[in-house]
């Protein structure tokens, strides 16, 4: 995929899930496999995002990322944080001190209330708090959301604090809320579209729906809007 990006000269990078690199079998194996991707991306001047999965592997994912970040540059490797986890603000404070490039999302896995906010309002409030921390850090981050309220909160905070439109980017899934995507670009914001890639995209999509039934309503509602 990195070679295809090179050949096409598109502005694109890759995002990988460490469980597909062996994380639940052996974290050391996952690190070695991810490191090979990171080496190739760095050589090509590209960027690898370490995606975040369920709370059972959150710490292991961060541990592998920190090892990679110690070896590669700020613009070679990044990570994802999920605002529905209680621990996320502490993780964000820790990671921006490295520093690290972070994609902030709400989270899509079905998590128990021992680890995640069960109430949407609390998830949203935490999203805004972490977003403000990230945008104030001076590092280029990704604000991943289809929620117009989170988008407006991000725009309002950036304007109040004098943070330029080119200092961060919005991120959304391919085909979801294309109207919002186009409006943001029209208004001068940076917009990255997340595309599940490869022949197994459909099983990936179905797993995401099965992990959290609320995702089904989210996709249907926003498909009609977009």
Image: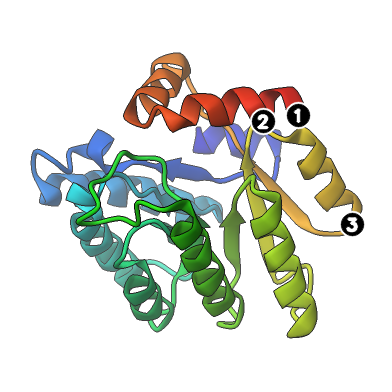
Label 1–label 2 contact, CB within 8 A: yes
Residue for badge 1: 225
Of 35 and 52, the residue lying toward us: 52
Residue at image position (64%, 34%) is 7
Q: Tag 1: Cα neighbours inside 10 Å, few (<14), some, or many (≥20)?
A: few
Label 3–label 2 contact, CB within 8 A: no
Q: Residue furthest left?
A: 26
Please say if 68 is above or below 41: below
Helix, strand or loop at label 2? It is helix
Q: Tag 2: Cα neighbours inside 10 Å, few (<14), some, or many (≥20)?
A: some
Residue 165 location (% of width, % of height): 79, 68
**Relative side of 162 to 221, left or right:** right
Of 171 and 40, the residue lying toward us: 171
Please say if 168 is above or below 115: below
Residue 105 location (% of width, % of height): 49, 53
Of 118 and 62, the residue lying toward us: 118
Of 32 and 78, the residue lying toward us: 78
Residue at image position (60%, 82%) is 136
**Relative side of 121 to 26, left or right:** right
First along the sequence among labels 3 and 2: 3
Can you see residue 199? no
Residue at image position (39%, 42%) is 16
Please say if 125 is above or below 213: below
Foreground mark, 3 or 2, reads 2
């Amino acid at each position: 995929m990195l070679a295809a990006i090179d050949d096409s000269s598109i502005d694109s990078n890759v995002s990988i899930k460490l469980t597909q690199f062996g994380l639940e079998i052996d974290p050391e194996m996952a690190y070695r496999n991810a490191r090979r991707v990171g080496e190739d991306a760095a050589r090509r001047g590209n960027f690898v995002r370490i995606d975040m999965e369920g709370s059972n592997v959150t710490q292991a994912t961060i541990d592998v990322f920190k090892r990679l970040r110690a070896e590669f540059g700020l613009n070679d490797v990044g990570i994802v944080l999920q605002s529905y986890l209680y621990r996320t603000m502490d993780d964000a404070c820790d990671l921006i001190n490295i520093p690290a490039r972070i994609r902030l999302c709400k989270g899509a896995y079905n998590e128990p209330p021992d680890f995640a906010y069960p109430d949407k309002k609390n998830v949203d409030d935490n999203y805004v708090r972490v977003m403000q921390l990230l945008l104030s850090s001076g590092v280029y981050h990704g604000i991943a959301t289809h929620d117009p309220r989170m988008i407006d909160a991000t725009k309002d905070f950036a304007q109040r604090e004098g943070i330029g439109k080119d200092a961060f980017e919005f991120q959304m899934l391919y085909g979801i809320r294309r109207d919002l995507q186009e409006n943001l670009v029209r208004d001068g914001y940076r917009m990255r579209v997340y595309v599940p890639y490869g022949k197994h995209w459909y099983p990936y999509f179905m797993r995401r729906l099965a992990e959290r039934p609320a995702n089904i309503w989210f996709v249907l509602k926003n498909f009609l809007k977009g």
